[in-house]
Amino acid sequence: KELESTVSERLPEAFLIFSGVAEKRFQTVLNELRPAAPHLIKAVVTQHNRCWKVSELFEELCRERESLGVHQK
């Protein structure tokens, strides 16, 4: 719990991190989430980012969102 509260204090919004989810299940989850939470940031653990801190991953996702103009409010 202490780690969760420390991380959430630094992150300005919630996001999901997926790891080890089969492609078919992953697509099903995404399809269900889109209508309910269209602006929710989502990430998949990859070989490239698996050692990153949560805050680093979040910052990278925000940079990507900004550069691509995705989900701009």
Image (tube, rainbow, N blue to C red):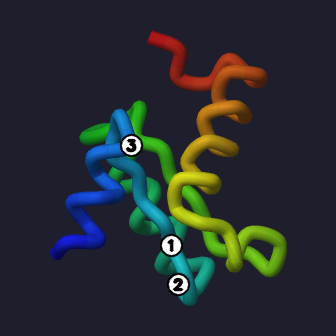
Tell me how far mark 3 sits from mark 2, CA to CA. Answer: 24 Å
Q: What residue lies at 69% left-to-right and 44% top-to-bottom?
A: 60
SS for callout 2: loop
Q: How many residues crowd around disc 1 within 10 Å: few (fewer than 14), some, or many (20 or more)?
A: few
- Which one is closest to the eye, mark 1 or mark 3? 3
Any mark on residue 21, and which? 2
Q: Position of residue 55 (x, y in %)?
A: 53, 53
Contact, CB < 8 Å: mark 2 with mark 1?
yes
Please report the residue visible at 40 percent of the width from the left and 65 percent of the height from the top: 29
Q: Give the labeled residue for mark 3.
A: 11
Query: According to the image, label 1 marks what residue?
Result: 18
Question: Mark 1 vs mark 3: which is more N-terminal?
Answer: 3
Q: Amino acid at mark 2?
A: Val
Crowd class of label 2 (few under 14; some 14 to 19; many from 20; radius 10 Å): few
* Residues marked 3 and 2 touching at CB (< 8 Å): no
The residue type indicated by label 3 comes to Leu
